[in-house]
């Protein structure tokens, strides 16, 4: 007689809709009547509102409280999320339940695998999040925010403010605005450095809408472009198109990564492309499946993923181009619609 | 011969200043020359800039890479952070290093305990973060943002925007603006509900400045106050003052919690105060020490903590009053300066 305790908060949200900061869910293998959600007293009202269909256990430390529920119903084999539970928390559970005849069984990535395939409702929310990103970038470009003299921080804040005004619930991750040599730092944090004519300006950002994240990168050039910038851009754009074209249901994840990487390798810039091609996106900004050189497995139909190759020339500048797409039976569904042609702004 | 692998990213930042999203640090018990930081290729430039004094190992999966470094230097006993490392990650390390004669030793809360005591530089950053919060709230009040007809979301966004304009690097946590009956939900998320005359308006928010978080809650009444609102406010204010007065070096954490809780219990509202008194604040919004009924230990001098009792009357409204303070040899140092007298706005 087995049950499963889900303690990863994103998985809890996925399964129940609960958005509090402390929770776990008990899923019984045989009797749905034993299913429970646990959270603490701060969320008494919220859990009743968000999860009316599950009986709530109100305790601070949820996994032991739920295991106790399962034990009292005669369950002896209890699965737990070994990719979420810490060694210390597991040690505590082992000490508490060892004498009660409970066997704890580590399970990894199960709910994450379910989450990798989006249903129509989730795709609609991702599409809305991506549309906010597109509209926000268009807005700040129309408003002349991206100009020589503006600081990276100012551009980042204006973009975030535009996303909020367009209905975002939050910012998907720390917005990256990286100008000039800073664009060669893949995950640069915006500084008070001012944008200057001739700079590559790399902007990587996203919105959260109803819990779902968008993710897009565009790289522009300010006022006048050098040949090396144009060539670098065309190389990355070609690689990115190859990566997008490789998004087919059942495709080997490493083969998808290679489709884009081979283009950059062939141009002699393989060493300057220091990350994977992309990642799943949904309730988390980074989720399954990861698309990289060391990825294992294949791309499921319905996966929402980014395709984001980049080439970074230290001291000079870098280009990254990133879209969010959904894998379908036909062409991948492009959720980020902002133009990708080389743009001098 | 022992070494310690720190894989909690906040602890890594505390020890080294590195702010990337993937890293770990190796600290040798005897030879500082063996100390290393590990991160992946995305952060090659950043790690050199932020951590010039430590040799960097560039690998995707940092803990095994650092244990390998320690092993090759003859270390056999390797500490790891058992309150950060997942059961699955630990299982992977055990499998990889079992035959290499490596003993993995779980260590919990060690760096967090160091972090609980702030030095003068950290206190200055916390003070700056709190000052941004004070000024932002004053700004939106002066601008008439908190008015009947405004939505919770609009108030939250205006407050966040004000913090950014005042120099915040980020928002400390999801801003809470809860009006009317929503104020009875301790961790309410702002909705499109409009503020109305006679509403309690609970605002819990903070800024991030150079990595350090501020945390403050104020509860106001819109236009006209009822007697029950005034009485509830005075009760919570009295409890909060008692909690602040109990902040002494060496004080038992449960006694600090009780100092405020006893006031609310005596008024018959103990059941409506559903959370602890406060928490440490620093590089994380919630860190050691926790101040609650089940807390263990004492308050160190130099701890930065919140004091935030609340009483929540479901369906009617709630009041929470929260400050961030630093424990000193004398009076606690109040970092959040916004007035706490009952305010009808």
Image (cartoon, coloured by chain):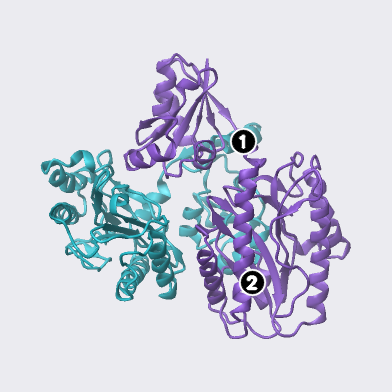
Chain colours: A purple, B cyan
Image coords of residue B190 (percent x, y):
40, 55
State the separation of the CA atoms marked 1 and 2. 37 Å
The residue located at (73%, 69%) in the rendering is: A319
Q: In the rendered image, is residue B65 in sight?
A: no
In this view, the residue in front, B57 or B225, is B225
Q: Which mark is residue A109?
A: 1
The numbered dot on residue A138 is: 2
Residue shown at 41% from the left, 47% from the top: B110
Residue with the most extreme left position:
B266
* Chain of the residue under the numbered disc 2 shown in the image: A
Against B171, residue B65 (above or below) is above
Nearest to N terminus: mark 1 or mark 2: 1
Quarter of the rendering occupied by the C terminus of chain A:
bottom right
Q: Quadrant of residue B161?
A: bottom left
- Residue B216 coordinates in the image, percent (x, y): 30, 60
Q: Chain of mark 1?
A: A
| A295 lies left or right of B267 | right
**B48 w.r.t. A228: above or below:** above
């Amino acid at each position: 007689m087995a049950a499963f305790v889900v303690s990863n908060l994103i998985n809890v949200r996925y399964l129940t809709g609960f958005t509090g900061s402390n929770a776990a869910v008990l899923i019984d293998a045989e009797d749905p009547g034993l299913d429970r959600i646990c959270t603490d007293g701060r969320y008494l009202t919220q859990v009743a509102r968000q999860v009316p269909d599950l009986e709530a256990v109100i305790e601070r430390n949820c996994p032991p409280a739920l295991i106790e529920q399962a034990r009292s119903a005669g369950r002896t084999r209890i699965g737990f999320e070994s990719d979420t539970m810490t060694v210390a928390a597991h040690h505590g559970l082992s000490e508490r339940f060892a004498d009660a005849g409970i066997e704890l069984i580590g399970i990894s990535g199960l709910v994450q695998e379910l989450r990798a395939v989006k249903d129509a409702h989730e795709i609609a929310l991702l599409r809305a999040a991506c549309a906010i990103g597109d509209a926000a970038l268009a807005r700040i470009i129309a408003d002349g925010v991206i100009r020589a003299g503006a600081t990276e921080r100012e551009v980042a804040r204006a973009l975030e403010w535009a996303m909020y005004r367009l209905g975002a619930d939050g910012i998907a991750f720390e917005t990256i605005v990286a100008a000039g040599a800073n664009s060669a730092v893949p995950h640069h944090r915006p500084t008070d450095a001012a944008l200057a004519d001739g700079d590559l300006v790399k902007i990587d950002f996203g919105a959260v809408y109803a819990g779902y994240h968008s993710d897009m990168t565009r790289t522009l050039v300010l006022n006048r472009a050098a040949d090396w910038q144009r060539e670098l851009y065309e190389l990355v754009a070609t690689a990115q198109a190859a990566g997008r074209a490789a998004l087919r249901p059942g495709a080997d994840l490493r083969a998808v990564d290679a489709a884009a990487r081979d283009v950059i390798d062939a141009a002699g810039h393989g060493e300057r492309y220091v990350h994977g091609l992309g990642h799943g996106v949904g309730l988390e900004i980074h989720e399954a499946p990861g698309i990289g050189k060391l990825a294992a497995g294949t791309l499921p139909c319905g996966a929402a993923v980014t395709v984001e190759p980049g080439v970074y020339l230290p001291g000079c500048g870098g280009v990254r181009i990133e879209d969010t797409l959904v894998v379908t039976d036909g062409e991948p569904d492009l959720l980020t619609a902002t133009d990708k042609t080389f743009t001098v702004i």
